[in-house]
């Protein structure tokens, strides 16, 4: 599944590049407003922080929410106490777009994450041109050389990389980059199976000074509490927010 998602995202990026060459996107990235400091926004605090996600669909669950106005949802998230907004821009399975990212960025004052299957520099420049402050890199989808090159580009553009892992080996690769923001995804993106305890197994290996993000398998406040007790500084939540009253649910999660 992960290989298919990455290949599909790459194909779509190449199609966009035919219409909007890299030089044009690079220029737009250079002209964009400076990125916000995501490491500061997501730094450890007395209570858990939440990255709230704009998510219409997923490969495992299909359609989740229509979300005709992603910006309005993002504003609600910000008012509800989210520390950052994640915007899924993958179009095939998640029904997102770069336009969603642009609209969200123009509507909130907190960091915005481009969540997609990034594998080439063009996608990184797209993220910055659209106003992203954070870009997702999935360790399992990339060889170490490519991972390091994309991480360096993200950093050079002033953004923060959220480096996503799913095993001890992947975590070691993320740490080798010097990543300051590391995610542990409970969902295996090859099989889409969930392991809510994976974060707790890997968190002790993440050194002090690195922000620890728990991803997936959040349905209730008890799930957030579970991650918090295991050492999560931040929890990324999508499905539980878009399939309920997002403000009410966000408040319950932040109260943990």
Image: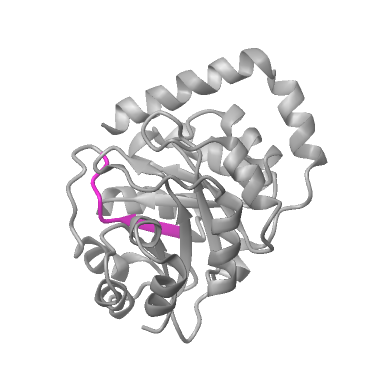
Q: Name the residue at 38% across, 79% down.
A: 252
161 or 115, nearer to the observer: 115
For the C terminus, the image quarter is bottom left
Q: Name the residue at 22% across, 66% down.
A: 201
Instruction: Residue at the far top: name it.
Output: 18
Q: Which residues are magenta?
A: 182-189
Q: Position of residue 119 (x, y in %)?
A: 48, 30
Instruction: Evaluate whether residue 211 shows in this view.
Output: no
Instruction: Evaluate whether residue 207 shows in this view.
Output: yes
For the N terminus, the image quarter is top left
Q: Is residue 215 left or right of residue 12?
A: left
Display colour scheme: one colour
* 102 over 251 or under it: above or below: above
Q: Name the residue at 55% across, 37% down.
A: 150
Q: Position of residue 128 (x, y in %)?
A: 67, 41
Q: Name the residue at 50% across, 77% down.
A: 44
Which of the 4 quarters of the picture holds residue 225? bottom left
């Amino acid at each position: 599944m992960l290989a298919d998602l990455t290949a599909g995202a790459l194909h779509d990026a190449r199609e966009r590049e035919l219409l909007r060459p890299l030089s044009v996107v690079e220029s737009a990235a250079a002209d964009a407003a400076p990125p916000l400091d995501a490491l500061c926004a997501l730094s450890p605090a007395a209570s858990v922080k939440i990255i709230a996600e704009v998510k219409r669909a997923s490969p495992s669950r299909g359609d989740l929410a229509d979300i005709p106005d992603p910006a309005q949802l993002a504003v609600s998230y910000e008012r509800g106490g989210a520390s950052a907004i994640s915007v899924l821009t993958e179009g095939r399975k998640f029904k997102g777009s770069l336009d969603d990212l642009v609209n969200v960025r123009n509507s909130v004052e907190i960091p915005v994450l481009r969540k997609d299957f990034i594998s080439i520099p063009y996608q990184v420049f797209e993220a910055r041109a659209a106003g992203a402050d954070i870009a997702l890199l999935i360790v399992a989808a990339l060889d170490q050389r490519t991972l390091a090159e994309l991480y360096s580009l993200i950093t050079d553009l002033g953004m923060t990389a959220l480096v996503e892992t799913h095993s001890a080996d992947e975590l070691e690769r993320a740490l080798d980059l010097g990543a300051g923001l590391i995610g542990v995804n409970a969902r295996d993106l090859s099989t889409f199976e969930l392991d809510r305890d994976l974060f707790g197994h890997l968190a002790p290996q993440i050194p002090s000074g690195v922000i620890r993000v728990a991803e997936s398998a959040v349905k209730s406040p008890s799930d957030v509490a579970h991650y918090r007790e295991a050492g999560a500084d931040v929890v990324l939540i999508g499905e539980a927010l878009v399939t309920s009253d997002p403000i009410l649910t966000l408040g319950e999660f932040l109260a943990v």
